[in-house]
Image: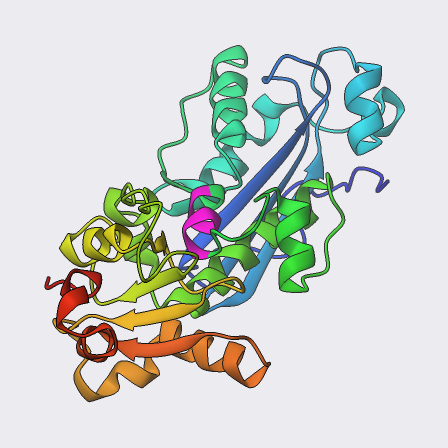
Amino acid sequence: MRTPAPDPVGSASSDAVTPDFVVVDVETACSRVSSICQIGIVGFRNGVEVFEYETLVDPLDHFSSFNTRIHGITSDHVVGAPHFGQIHAVIDRHLSSRITVAHSFFDKGALGAACAIHDRAVIETTWLDSVRVAKRAWPELPSHRLNVLTKFLGVRHKHHDALSDARAAGMVIVRAIEHTGIELAAWLSSNNTRRGRAPVAAETGPLKGQRVAILGAGRDGQLARSLAAAGARIMSCVGATTTKLVISDTHPFGRFVTAHAEHRRAEELQRGGAAIEIVSEGELRRIFGSTHKAAAGTE
């Protein structure tokens, strides 16, 4: 466990380079979410880390054995560390008026509670939940906990260390942008952070057992409904278990469709030996013939 640094501003400043987004993570001393005992913030620009900030915090509260077992921080570690009210201005400078990522909104609630306890203004920032981003980008994963994601993505990570957790959550966003082709601004919209409800796959049909991702059409649109009616399970995006990538006849990518992240991901899986097909909506219609036109549908 690090000892408190004499300079709570951290080793690098966010003033030198304006980040595309910042990531925050906190650890708490006990069940009260206001009891922040460590905070880590990392700034990213163009997919690269541009600054970090970390400090231990005196929660002015007791340390429960349960929380200490999780993060390893005890009351001895925070002797001489600032309390939240003393570093509020620093936190505000790093987060205010920026896009702030947190892995779940626990950290948002903890910061809000600490502001209230210490009679400080709520930090005004635009929040983005990296859990919801990860669920959209990699729906095939059994869990979207941060330690599961970092193992899957091959990211170095010390779980329940605030700085390492913040850095890891930032890399989840970076990799999700690379994987899906969805830019940061688009992730902020409710349409991209909330997955549309996919239609339920029919129990029988020519696509029964198939796990299908669609490029160029929504997973809750007519094409998806037609594929589900033919027995296919509709996926949010291409994953390790996807068996078909269907390119909608109405996709907007033109001849650049092969450059799309989903198409590239499918090709990578093919090269790795996965049994995934890349077919157009029209090709799928021809495969099943006129008696199975519903399997391809029209958007």
Q: Magenta residues, as a range? A: 132-137
- The kind of secondary structure the magenta stretch mainly shows is helix
Percent position of residue 72, x then y = 84, 31
Q: In this view, does 247 lie to the left or right of 221?
A: right
Q: In this view, does 269 lie to the left or right of 72?
A: left
Percent position of residue 286, x then y = 19, 79
Is the image coloured rainbow, by chain, by secondary structure, or in one colour?
A: rainbow
21 in relation to 54, above or below: below
100 or 234, which is in the foreground? 234
The residue positioned 38% from the left and 56% from the top of the image is: 208
Q: Is residue 97 visible?
A: yes
The residue positioned 59% from the left and 81% from the top of the image is: 272
Look at the image and say whether residue 135 sits in the magenta stretch.
Answer: yes
Residue sitting at the far right: 76
193 in relation to 45, above or below: above
Residue sitting at the far front: 291
Look at the image and say whether residue 254 sits in the magenta stretch.
Answer: no
284 or 203, which is in the foreground? 203
52 in relation to 38, above or below: below
Say which quadrant the C terminus sits in.
bottom left
Q: Is residue 166 left or right of residue 185?
A: right
142 or 187, which is in the foreground? 142
The residue positioned 59% from the left and 18% from the top of the image is: 33
Say which quadrant the N terminus sits in.
top right
